[in-house]
Amino acid sequence: MIEQIEVGSEIARRFDPFMPVKVAFWFKVVDGYDWELCIASDRIDEKNLDDGHAEVLKLIREQNTPYIDLFRIRLANSSDPLATALLKEREKYPGSRVGIRVGEGWFGDRAIEGAYIYPESIIAEKERASAH
């Protein structure tokens, strides 16, 4: 899972200029097949979802890695119940510089086996590092 977390952070960071990312996280629904990466933005809606997926596909191709594919990435509006619930979990640890893991539970509108929530700072930190 470490490789997926690293690749997911890079995709979220690089997606941010296209549509500002409010929260990004990996999650696995109860009885689900595999972990999925969710990228949530206030700007994602039904009208531009295809554009968002095209951007993600471009970013995946640029990554050239076996650790992620388009079918494991979900784009959502920040008002999505799962995104809102996991954003609230992240807000319990303001200023955290590491990701937050949550265990099994009911979050928003679904039961999940677990989640890994990227810290808010990951996008800003990587942008500052690449500017130097």
Image (tube, rainbow, N blue to C red):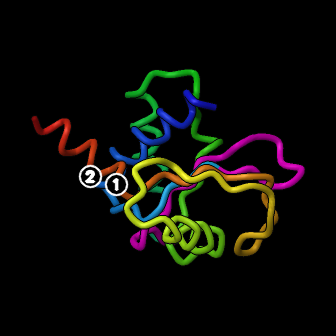
Please state if 19 lies on the left or on the right of 27 as rendered. left
Closer to the camera in the image, 49 or 99: 99
Badge 1 density bin: few <14, some 14–19, many ≥20, Cα 10 Å = some
In the rendered structure, which segment of residues is drawn in magenta? 27-45
Please state if 107 lies on the left or on the right of 6 as rendered. right
User: Residue at 54% across / 78% down in the picture?
Assistant: 79
Callout 2 amino acid: Ala
- Vertical arrangement, residue 73 with respect to residue 95, above or below: above
Q: Which residue lies furthest to the left in this view?
A: 132
Closer to the camera in the image, 15 or 106: 106
Closer to the camera in the image, 118 or 94: 94
Label 1: state its secondary structure.
Answer: helix
- Where does the image place residue 94, in percent across and percent down from the top left? 42, 67
- For label 1, the residue is 121
Please state if 129 lies on the left or on the right of 44 as rendered. left
The reply to whether dot 2 and dot 1 touch (C-beta < 8 Å) is yes
- Where does the image place residue 95, in percent across and percent down from the top left? 37, 61
Label 2: state its secondary structure.
Answer: helix
Magenta segment includes 37: yes
- For label 2, the residue is 124
- Where does the image place residue 19, in percent across and percent down from the top left? 34, 61
User: Residue at 26% across / 52% down in the picture?
Assistant: 124
- In the picture, the quarter occupied by the N terminus is top right
The circle drawn on residue 81 is none
- Vertical arrangement, residue 80 with respect to residue 15, above or below: below
Callout 1 amino acid: Ser
- Where does the image place residue 98, in percent across and percent down from the top left? 46, 47
- In the picture, the quarter occupied by the C terminus is top left
Magenta segment includes 12: no
